[in-house]
Image: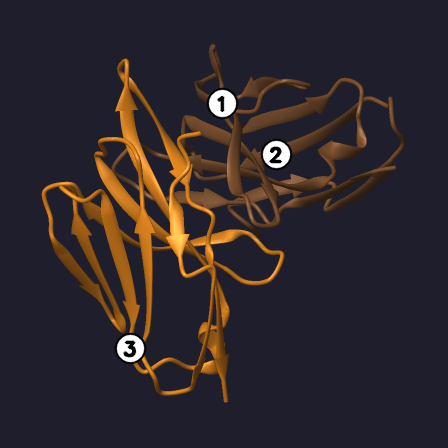
Chain colours: A orange, B brown
Amino acid sequence: SQQGEEDPQALSIQEGENATMNCSYKTSINNLQWYRQNSGRGLVHLILIRSNEREKHSGRLRVTLDTSKKSSSLLITASRAADTASYFCATVATTSGTYKYIFGTGTRLKVLA
Amino acid sequence: DADVTQTPRNRITKTGKRIMLECSQTKGHDRMYWYRQDPGLGLRLIYYSFDVKDINKGEISDGYSVSRQAQAKFSLSLESAIPNQTALYFCATSAGQYTEAFFGQGTRLTVV
């Protein structure tokens, strides 16, 4: 399977704390993206980082990418109860001139008020 | 209106029945995808299409077929449904490889 893996599988923190989740992947990539999924609903795009970038910020989100280790991390600072969701990384790799999004297994985040 | 619309949202069907899940998008993108989500397994790619004449198998295409009726429409069929196809199915669309994917709200399919 080409799927990546997120770590941890589940995370429970108090409101105001920071949440860090990690993603490992298997193939060479063009870019890596993070998505959020509220319970049983569609995925929503959060942030994209290209293979030649090492760090990217968007609001309370900070993403890092280490292509030598085939890993990425997502940091959510000052978490809120509304951040409770599952988070997935998706890698985009080019194969034979085409590309596709390959998703990891997800981290379930619970933020306690 | 949602950018990506899936119908039906929920469906219960019997083993052996043929069922079609429909997806339409208003983003004007050429690329469309079907994914399946199972607990603990994340999303797995079933089929993807880069234009009306281009259909590609994903990692778990066995037991499924697709039809790209138009740029905006991409349907997934289960020829003869079986219980282990019980899952949450998502359709998505994207403009290109350096862009985000937009997802529908999902179809929860139960095969009994």
Q: Which mark is residue B44?
A: none
Q: Which mark is residue B23?
A: 2
Q: Which secondary structure lies at badge 3?
A: loop
Q: Amino acid at mark 3?
A: Thr
For label 3, the residue is A77
Image coords of residue B58 (percent x, y) = 49, 22
Name the subunit of mark 2: B
Residue A7: x and y in percent read 38, 57
Secondary element at tag 1? loop
Q: Residues within 10 Å of mark 2 (few under 14, many from 20)?
A: many
Q: Are marks 2 and 1 on the same chain?
A: yes
Closer to the camera: disc 2 or disc 1? 1
Write down the quadrant of residue B4 in the picture: top right
User: For the residues tagged 3 and 1, is the chain the same?
Assistant: no
Q: Chain of mark 1?
A: B
Q: CA distance from mark 3 to mark 2?
A: 36 Å
Pair 3/2: label in front? 3
Residue at (34%, 34%) from the top-left corner? B95
Nearer to the camera, A111 or A83: A111
Q: Is residue B27 above or below residue B65?
A: below
Of the pair A48 and B26, the residue shown nearer to us = A48
Measured Cα–Cα span from mark 2 to mark 1: 17 Å
